[in-house]
Amino acid sequence: MKQLLIILILLQTFTVFAQNEDLIKYANPLIGTHKMGHTYPGATVPFGMVQLSPETDTLPYEVNGRYNPSVYKYCAGYQYDDPTIVGFAHTHFSGTGHSDLGDFLVMPTVGELQMNPGTEDDPKSGFRSAFSHDNEHAEPNYYQVMLEDDQINAELTTSNRVGFHQYTFPKSSDAHIILDMMYGIYNYDDKNVWTFIRVENDTMVTGFRQTHGWARTRTMYFAMTFSKPFKQYGTSDYSKKQVYKGFWRKFDQANNFPDIAGEQIRMHFDFDTEEGEKIKIKFALSPVSTANAVENLNTEIPHWDFEKAKKDGQQLWQKEFEKINVTTGSEEEMVNFYTAMYHTFLGPTTYMDVNGQYKGLDQNVHQADGFTNYTTFSLWDTYRALHPFFNVIQPTRNADMVQSMLAHYDQSVHKMLPVWSHHANENWCMIGYHSVSVIADAVMKDNIDFDANKALDACVATANYRKYDGIGYYLDMGYVPEDKNSSSVSKTLEYAYDDFCIAQMAKKLGRDDVYKEFSKRAENWKNVYDASIGYMRPKLSDGTFRKDFDLLSTHGQGYIEGNAWNYSLYVPQDPATMIEMMGGKKQFVKHLDSLFTMDLPDEFFAHTEDITREGIIGNYVHGNEPAHHAAYLYNWTDQPWKTQDKIRMILKKQYQAAPDGLGGNDDCGQMSAWYIFSSLGFYPVAPGSDQYAFGSPAIKTATLHLENGKTFEIEAVNQSDKNVYVKKIELNGKAIDRRYLTHSEITNGGKLTFYMSSRPKK
């Protein structure tokens, strides 16, 4: 009895330890910083407004008036292969295939003052510095690197709205902090509309930057404060020469002048430093005003304790990571899992000040009433898995994100929900209007902290906005004609899916008229299916299919970032009917098998920037989103074990614990959300329904700590790299004889047990 008691005590101790394990150690911000990952390695807190990160080059968006393809590598500002750092900027996107931001570059230097960044080939010709990965370290909310040319140790941490820099200098009578208002990601000469800087005193600087980029009219305000007074300061103005100069010419604006404005400005702040002296900077952002930026600064980090700010931010990450406690069996898989969680919690990003004010789509100042306002909605990507993941693990935040979308709708002159929005702008990127999917998914899963009927009205209005991207043709003809609007097949398929989402939401809310209308519209995908070839195909306005058509090409064939093989599978709302139309289950299995085994030569995606070899398995393009549900479609056939086999293969091939470990753009967390769901053993094939299709869990155990106070446990008995097949599934001890899990079965709490085998259950 005594021995049994000791064992029980040890088990309890282990359980407490496991729940309180330092999970933050597994998340590695450097994963995905190379090739197609497009993530940034710097410091931020979960969903933070500030993403403070190093920039490794200054490539322009255009050269000789034409797009510069090399700039694509710098969507996040950082490339792992680069040998130099030009500075540290405060705003970034994570894993996008287009870009903007990179605001307010800060760079410490010593010696002769240099006000241009120099070149990678000759870093000493400017203020950039060489660096080595041997002297670089990144973890959630902390980044450190030795700037080798000047032997300055740079450290970064943050709060939600404040970046905290700590630079350890050598002894110098000529130390500088450069503030570069010209630098930006996807930059070009006229991107800066205007910048303004006001030196308030010898430790405080405020200002703003207005840009014309992916966000057409974007203004960000700042407040910058130093831990030590600067001894002098100066300005370099690279703005285009203008005939009208006003009467500011009365002043020497280059030296110690406190009121600076222009399109292209850099400033320097000069110091004397002792050996090992730390100069710290707190840099706060605001979408509204410099006064709000100062308030954000004083509220969030009122002290100068760098280690405290770092620890406070890391505790926020630990709290988020503890929402899912997993064991996987290997260190690499633990790193992959928690790095994926890290990526999913980088965005959408907070877009309001501590007082609740934010700038709206109408460019006016609004007050968030009872919700946190978010921005960075990469909805063509994130509706698929990221927002469904939030409905499981971050329901309160996701409801706030829906409220942010509804605020966008209220402020929209078009009366449309967001398509791809950031920083009080709609940039109209990609296709569909998948905020509808996000809203419907929240309603169907009872995650409603908003007026659901008002939300449905906004969805209907968006779906009927004829001017947007072929919707008028879609309403009149039941499809988008390729000769009138490009990427027509993709648009028709995605509009039909969004129609399904509206129909499901209307049914739940008792809006029968809306349900009937949009249920019928949801079948429009059939209008672009060509039974003679067994694929979706571009249709022309005269009702005929386009004759010149290539099944493998990802360019100019009626699709966006995909080809006919991948996109023809995009009927997530009705896979059973799609499979029947494609020849039935037996024929469909052969087709799906071929997707994963055939060869897609490079020539077929050579003109599609977002698709590269790293993200392709056979002809299955995992590195881009349209086929993310494809491997789960075996569940609608007689061979569901092939879903299990394919999922585990994709997990191994497309996700690795390395800087180039992602097989494609993370796309604001979508790739990582796919990884998390698939590792846990289920996936939301059709957001807007309450079902998750079963796959093959790659974890051994997982405990989901839900916001309602309940826990949902997952155990994969005998799970291993060989045992990828599911022999039996039990929910709370009772066998499940279906191929899906419902949302309420998760949120009610309980235990899901997979019994794994090396042989498929046929």
Image: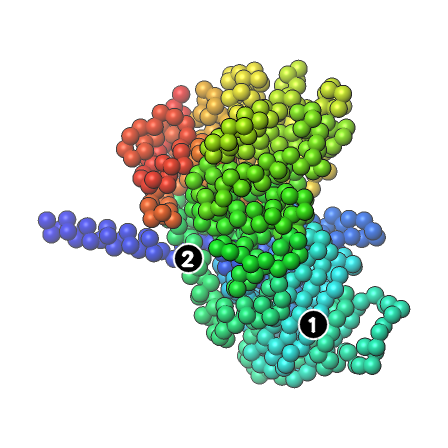
Disc number placed over residue 318 in the picture, else none: 2
CA gap, disc 1 to disc 2? Answer: 37 Å
Q: Is residue 136 visible?
A: no
Looking at the image, what colour scheme do you see? rainbow
Which residue is painted at 49% across and 75% down in the image? Answer: 303
Left or right: where 717 falls relative to 232: left
Which residue is painted at 64% across and 78% down in the image? Answer: 200
Q: Three-letter amino acid code at disc 2? A: Gln
In the image shown, does 81 or 420 lie closer to the viewer? Answer: 420
Where residue 744 appears, as percent x and y from the top left, is 38, 37
Residue topped by disc 1: 197
Q: Is residue 691 visible?
A: yes
Dot 1 lies on which element? Answer: strand
Where residue 555 appears, as percent x and y from the top left, is 72, 34
Determine crowd level at label 2: few under 14, some 14-19, many 20+ residues with C-alpha closer than 10 A.
some
> Given the current orientation, which residue lies at the most extreme right position?
243
